[in-house]
Image: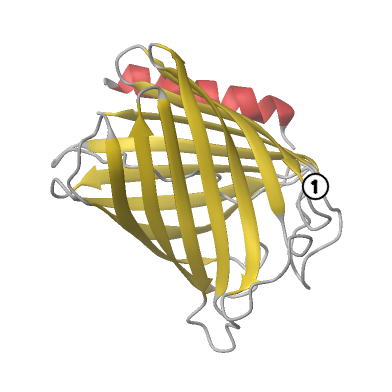
Amino acid sequence: MNRAAIGRLLAAALALCGAVAQAAPEEIQVYLDELSAPGQFGIDLHNNVALSASSTPAYAGAVPPDHVYRLTPEFYYGLTPELELGWYVLTSRTGDGAASLDGSKLRLKYIAPHDEHSGAFWGLNFEFGRTRHTVSEQPWNAQLKGIVGYRDGAWTVGANPNLDWSPSPGGGPVLASLDLKVARAVAEGTQLGAELYSELGPASRIQGWRRNGKTLYLVLDRTVGADVDIDFGIGHGLTPDADRWVLKFIAGTHF
């Protein structure tokens, strides 16, 4: 993809979500088996908008999620047929228009060799980075994400069991979460599906359904042209701790 096309991709993503300009996690995505070829660069633009969320800070110094827009460019590069290196740049804008650079994260993703068209797949993704106190109570944070899934005809299912922790002093317990996706191809290059994001509490003591955030998304995935992938979803919080309504939009390409 040439520079002009990349510029159009950036402009389209900013225009779509910037017009709403209202925050959710910096990345709302179920990882499947996507992987860049060795020597290939790519970029994803993660946009998340809390249409209706809490106006109370989660901790002293945090920015309440309501009416906050987050844009997270993700740059990645294929190292080997099984390994991909990525870098996230976290940015946000509050409802009154104050923009900020919130930190960055590195990730390393491994996907085991498999049939890309049918059957099972699995992998692992490790992330580590530093963020501002306004978006994370601890400055240093890490995540280990499991990737498991299966394809059968038009259907794709995937799951990400996650462990999150902070290596910072007093970083607290290891937290568990589970992300699920079910999608069905409805046309060439187009899938419709649902995604469920479930926070489970401390990994040593999984908590009940009504505790922590649980959000269900209806999602459209579409390939535009030969090299632009679009992910659009609207999510509704299922528990009191979740944002009530969230819009997400991801645009990505390789070059």
With 41 as the anchor, is 138 left or right in this view? right
With 122 as the anchor, is 78 left or right in this view? left
* Residue most extreme to the bottom: 169
Residue situated in front as seen by the camera: 88 or 215: 215
Q: Quadrant of residue 138?
A: bottom right
Above or below residue 254? Residue 143 is below
Q: Residue 27's x, y, as percent? A: 53, 47
Residue in the image at 20% along x and 42% along y:
114
Q: Residue 136's x, y, as percent? A: 62, 67
Above or below residue 88? Residue 176 is below
Residue in the image at 36% along x and 24% along y:
6
Amino acid under disc 1: Asp
Residue situated in front as seen by the camera: 130 or 110: 110
Residue in the image at 51% along x and 75% along y:
165
What residue is shown with label 1? 66
Residue situated in front as seen by the camera: 101 or 193: 193
Above or below residue 190? Residue 124 is below
Q: Residue 58's x, y, as percent? A: 77, 66
Check disc 1 and report its element: helix, strand or loop: loop
Position of the N terminus, as image quadrant, is top left
Residue in the image at 26% along x and 29% along y:
117
- The answer to whether one can see residue 23 in this image is no
- The answer to whether one can see residue 235 in this image is yes
Above or below residue 126? Residue 190 is above
Position of the C terminus, as image quadrant, is top left
With 223 as the anchor, is 63 left or right in this view? right
Q: Residues within 10 Å of mark 1 (few under 14, many from 20)?
A: many
Say how many tags the image has: 1
With 7 as the anchor, is 23 left or right in this view? right
Q: Residue 125's x, y, as percent? A: 35, 58
